[in-house]
Structure formats: structure tokens, C-alpha cells
Image (cartoon, coloured by chain):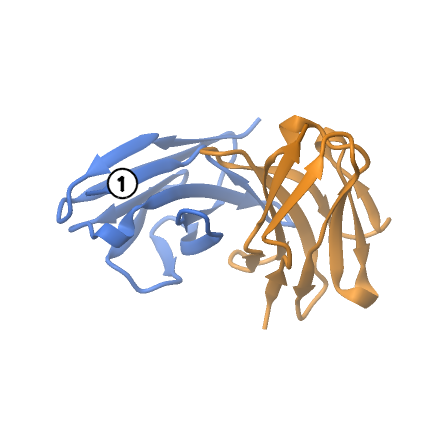
Amino acid sequence: SQTIHQWPATLVQPVGSPLSLECTVEGTSNPNLYWYRQAAGRGLQLLFYSVGIGQISSEVPQNLSASRPQDRQFILSSKKLLLSDSGFYLCAWGGGFYNEQFFGPGTRLTVL
Amino acid sequence: AQSVTQPDIHITVSEGASLELRCNYSYGATPYLFWYVQSPGQGLQLLLKYFSGDTLVQGIKGFEAEFKRSQSSFNLRKPSVHWSDAAEYFCAVGGNTGNQFYFGTGTSLTVIP
């Protein structure tokens, strides 16, 4: 069966520091991969999606970036964090004809 | 434009009472419809999905949803709510290409004893 991992689970970072969040998927190949952000009390905001290695599409202009160095690895990065980057970050994978999405456990990021 | 509307931001029900969460969608092609549940501090779990066929679909945890094309709706129901159902519920619509997946803003469910 497929599983999706995210780490770290919780992260507290100062403003201006770099960020690297990692997501890996097991049990499937060539998945579509997604990064979402969920601000407190709000819905899901799609940040990036990828349909293959090295293929990244950005949905929202911001100081974040994403990379997909391997088929089942998706990384969310920032060179300098802002206070507004605080939130709950969710990675998801989608596949198959209907492309339903399956979510990881999330990373809680607090920028101070 | 593609979109999902969940008109109820927050709903409170008594334990044992029935539940209906509303979802309306706008999608230019045949929609694939989903309901997800999110417990506090956790990821989203897929409750059920509709692709085609029988318009009443059954999901996990005793939930069901009915697709009504004429009303562009996909409402989630449960006959008897349990305290453990308290969570955030998201409706989503998608197609069969990589980026066509749209979430509603969610409905927060509180269950009172």
C-alpha cells in the first residue's frame, strides 16, 4: 500500500532563516505531488504541484520554492522565511485515472 | 471557472443527531467529487468519492454523499453523529489531469453531548 511521509512534524524558525520541508511517497511510481498551506482557521491553498521529476508548477507567487529531485521526493524550500509563512504545510500525492489525492500528516511551521 | 463552495463555516450538532454538510461545485467537465475529513493537527483523510454511476456513495465511518447534477451539489450525510466526528470537513472537485483539483474552504463540525 501507499504511504506518504513528511518531516519534520513541527518546526519553529526565526524570521529570515532558511527552510527545507521534505515529503516522500512509498508504494507508487510517477505520482503527481502537491504542496498545500493551511493558515490558522482557513482552507487549503495550493502552493506547488509536480507531474514528474524536475517539473514544478507554482500556483501562488511567494518566497517559497519547490523541487522534485527524485520521482517520489518533493521538497519545499525558502531562502528567507517571513512571519506570514507560518502555517500548516501539507504534502499530497495523486495518481490513477481519477487522480484522487492522499495527504501526509503535515508540518506545523511557526516563524517568530 | 472551477470552484467549490461550502456555505456553512461552522456547524454544531448533538451527539446522535443526523448531519448534513453542504457542498456546491462549479466545474466545466464531468466532475470527480470528494469529501475529506481533517482532525486537529493532522492531515486530510479521504472519506468518500464519486466518479460515475450510482449517485449515492458510501464512505468510511458511516458517511454517505449524494451527487445531484441538477443542483451541482454533493452533500455529505451521516444518520447519527458520534463525538469522534468533530473535525473539519472539506469538499473537493477534480478532473483527470494533474492540477485540476479544487477544495472548498471547509466546514468545522462541533459535536455536543
The residue drawn where x is 49% and y is 34% is B40
The single residue placed furthest to the left in the displayed view is: A16
The single residue placed furthest to the front in the displayed view is: B113
The single residue placed furthest to the bottom in the displayed view is: B1
User: Is A80 left, or right, of A10 in this rendering?
Assistant: left
Q: In this structure image, what is the colour of chain B?
A: orange
Name the residue type under label 1: Thr
Toward the viewer: B107 or B1?
A: B107
Determine whether A16 is above or below B26 in the image: above
User: Is A105 left, or right, of B91 in this rendering?
Assistant: left
Question: How many circles with numbers are drawn on the protein?
Answer: 1
Q: Position of residue B89 (x, y in %)?
A: 61, 44
Mark 1 — residue? A110
Local SS, label 1: strand
The residue drawn where x is 75% and y is 59% is B73
Q: Position of residue B101 (x, y in %)?
A: 56, 56
Q: Which chain is blue?
A: A
* The C terminus of chain A: image quadrant: top left
The residue drawn where x is 66% and y is 67% is B27
* The N terminus of chain A: image quadrant: top right
Toward the viewer: B12 or A54?
A: B12
Q: Position of residue A20 (x, y in %)?
A: 24, 40
